[in-house]
Amino acid sequence: MSHMMLRLALLSLAWVPMAFAQITITSVTNAASFEAGSLSQGSIGAIFGTGLATTTAEAGSIPIPFSLAGATVTVNGVKAPLFYASTVQINFHPF
């Protein structure tokens, strides 16, 4: 199992001043087991927190998009595809 640095970046909050757009990440887990630190190749990750996205959105097509609801996830410098994004949760594929 490799360790990963996860970086969450908001692309745009045009209608909200950036001073109010605070992102807080409380945990990063395996989306199936919700176990922290258990992401492995081929798994789906879940990020929990607040202010993670501007609204709720889900991937509606293949290929899975790299941005949903104004949110992107970067794993070791590479954008990860996003399955789901909301203000409190993002599901992503890190590999």
Image (cartoon, rainbow, N blue to C red):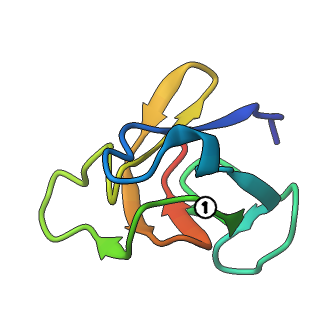
Residue 20, relative to residue 73: is it above or below?
below
Decide if residue 39 is in sight here: no
Residue 42, relative to residue 14: is it above or below?
below
> In the rendered picture of this protein, how many numbered marks are placed on residues?
1
Residue located 31% across and 72% down the image = 57
Q: Residue furthest left?
A: 61
Residue located 53% across and 40% down the image = 18
Question: Is 3 displayed left or right of 64 in the figure?
Answer: right
| Quarter of the N terminus within the rendering | top right
Q: Could you tell me residue 87's position as x and y percent?
A: 54, 70
Q: Nearer the viewer, residue 20 or 64?
A: 20
Residue 34, relative to residue 36: is it above or below?
below
Q: Residue furthest top?
A: 77
Q: Could you tell me residue 79's position as x and y percent?
A: 44, 31
Q: Nearer the viewer, residue 68 or 16?
A: 16
Residue located 36% across and 40% down the image = 12
| Element marked by disc 1 | loop
Q: Could you tell me residue 56's position as x and y percent?
A: 37, 76
Residue located 38% across and 65% down the image = 83
| Amino acid type for the residue under numbered disc 1 | Gly
Decide if residue 59 is in sight here: yes
Q: Dot 1 corresponds to which residue?
A: 51
**Label 1 neighbourhood size at 10 Å, few (<14), some (14-19), many (20+)?**
some
